[in-house]
Amino acid sequence: MHKRAFIKVLSGTLAAAVLATGPVSAQDPTKVAFVYVGPVGDHGWTYRHDVGRKAVEAEFGDKVETTYVESVAEGADAERVIRNLASKGNDLVFTTSFGYMNPTAKVAKQFPDVKFEHATGYKQAANLATYSARFYEGRAVIGTIAGHMTKSGIIGYIGSFPIPEVVRGINAFTIAMRKVRPDAQVKVVWVNSWYDPGKEGDAAKALIDQGADIIAQHTDSPAPLQVAEQRGVYAFGQASDMRAFAPKAQLTAIVDEWNYYYVDRTRAVMEGTWQSQDVWLGLKEGMVEIAPYGDAVPEDVRAAADSVKQAIIDGSLHPFQGPIANQAGEVVVAEGETVSDKDLLGMNWYVEGVQGELPK
């Protein structure tokens, strides 16, 4: 249902205009390249993007040729890799990390005939589109579960970088959690990396030592879940269903679903209908999904989580609808108001219930 709705949303956008260049020659395979911030075997963020790449191959067969470069550091190295892919005749290049935004924009100017798509960024051009998922909607669902299941009232949260996307997720999680348990607190450890199993595991250990009985994360490896399994506490998977790594510990996971977006955008290039756009979709459209609940999640908690998920899908609930207080307890979003997309995209403050200062 959600997947069909997702395709319908994209089809309306993609059919709006046909580029003057027309469709790619039927004789030549459409070349599509992907740039990944982590290894395809991270079992999280990059793994899910690569699942999307494989979906493109499965959909179009020998009509496409896909390539990828993994573990590309954000910054100068990313610019070199993106430029190299553009110069090799790729028709479409997906760059899949926030830190690739400026390098992608720079290279896009130099290769106007190549189509570029940047994940989680905000800079567009005639040949540069942006796309992201409303991951914070999934955070509201798992925050609800955490509020029901924590005994200590302390949740550990492992953050990658203090950018709006991650801060937004921490806040959505905390708001939902405190609707269930108003005295619960979230402790955040920043590891300043998207993928570093050692740092992620150490952060999980530190948070558990501080009393956390549930671990959440916005990093890409299953290391925090594995630590949770070893230490007898609960945790949530990130970007992918990680239950295989922690069958007892994982309560559920937020799953990123890129398949349909990548297939539709590749098709648009093949048909000559591609145009720049900014897409930000969530649970309703199927770009964000919730993995099956773990055995430890009671039926009443499953029902509560499902209720929040359904309310977000049907529009009766927004994870950032007021009243919302900041860390100081000051109401910054009044009852009946909702934080705008613009403010969500620039979010740089913590809500009440998050401990510690937000790094600048």
Image (tube, helix red, strand yellow):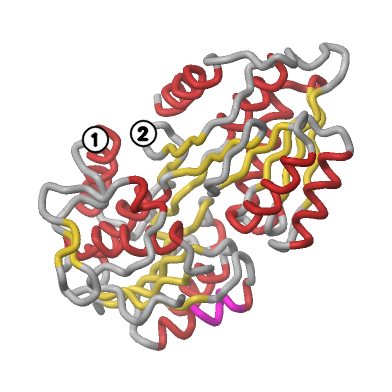
Residue 133 at x, y percent in the picture = 47, 43
Residue 151: in sight, yes or no?
no
Amino acid type shown at disc 1: Gly
Residue 116: in sight, yes or no?
yes
Residue at horizontal 31 percent and vertical 58 percent from the top: 172
Indicate whether 101 appears above or below 223: above
**In the rendered structure, which segment of residues is drawn in magenta?**
199-203
**Are the residues tagged 1 and 2 within 8 Å (C-beta)?**
yes
Residue 319 at x, y percent in the picture = 26, 50
Distance (Cα) linking label 1 and label 2:
9 Å
The residue under label 2 is: 284
Indicate whether 118 appears above or below 277: below
Q: Main secondary structure of the magenta part?
A: helix
- State the residue in front, 161 or 258: 161
Indicate whether 18 appears above or below 71: above
Tell me the SS state at disc 2.
loop
Residue 18 found in image quarter: top right
Indicate whether 49 appears above or below 216: above
Residue count near mark 2 (Cα–Cα under 10 Å), binned few <14, some 14–19, many ≥20: many
Residue at horizontal 41 percent and vertical 71 percent from the top: 157
Residue 217 at x, y percent in the picture = 46, 65
- State the residue in front, 56 or 171: 171
Residue 315 is marked as: 1
Residue 239 is marked as: none
Is 67 positioned to the left or the right of 52 in the image? right
Residue 350 at x, y percent in the picture = 31, 69
